Amino acid sequence: MTDHDKPLSGQESLDIIHRMIGRAKGNIRNRVFYFLLWGWIVITGSMGHYLLLEFSSLNHPEWAWIVVLVGIVASFVQGYRDRKEISGAILRYKPLKLGAVFVWVMAIVAFLVMVHYQLLATAAAVFVGYLIPGYMLQNSER
């Protein structure tokens, strides 16, 4: 009988389950970086665009979105460091699901308001849908 054919003891089974749960938590923890990074990037772009549109004479307030380049570089660097596949566990995180519902509601609201208020709706959606669940997840892992 090889090691693979030998039945596991109760303790060995529990150890395997414990290790798998630990790995899933690690995968979720690694993804928090992206939720927080892109949450702040989108809020900065949305609010910057709105403020430049409302309170400046700049011809191209959409230049506030140049901040996305920071997110792209940071995501690339972090992704290079991680090199791990996304865990399905993060998609089962309840605050993230509730945040997603709020994002959809704000998408409908944004469709119904003037364009420059869509920027505020975007910032609110990302704050509730990305940052709050991201910080909750980050704090739960400590």
Image: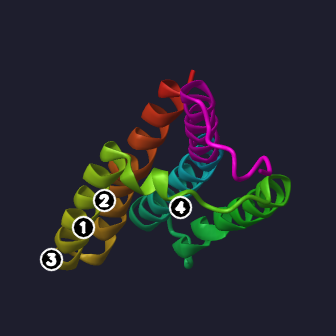
The mark lying in front, picked from 2 and 4, is 2
The mark lying in front, picked from 3 and 2, is 2
The local crowd at label 1, few if under 14, some if 14 to 19, many if 20 or more residues have their Cα within 10 Å, is few
In the rendering, at what x and y percent does residue 115 appear?
A: 30, 77
Ranked by sequence position, the earlier of labels 1 and 4 is 4
Q: Quadrant of the C terminus?
A: top right
Give the SS element for disc 3.
helix
| Residue at 69 percent of width and 52 percent of height | 5
The amino acid on which the numbered mark 3 sits, given as a three-letter code, is Leu
Q: Which range is magenta?
A: 1-28
Which of 18/47 is in front?
Answer: 18
The residue where tag 3 is placed is 112
111 lies above or below 109: below
The mark lying in front, picked from 1 and 4, is 1
Distance (Cα) linking label 3 and label 4? 21 Å
Distance (Cα) linking label 1 and label 4? 19 Å
Residue at the top extreme, as displayed: 142
Which of 140/111 is in front?
Answer: 140
Distance (Cα) linking label 1 and label 3? 13 Å
Q: Point out which mark residue 45 bears.
A: 4
Ranked by sequence position, the earlier of labels 1 and 3 is 1
Tags 1 and 2 touching, CB below 8 Å? yes
In magenta stretch: residue 25: yes
Ranked by sequence position, the earlier of labels 3 and 2 is 2
The amino acid on which the numbered mark 4 sits, given as a three-letter code, is Gly
Q: Point out which mark residue 100 bears.
A: 2
In the rendering, at what x and y percent does residue 141 appear?
A: 54, 27
Q: Quadrant of residue 121?
A: bottom left
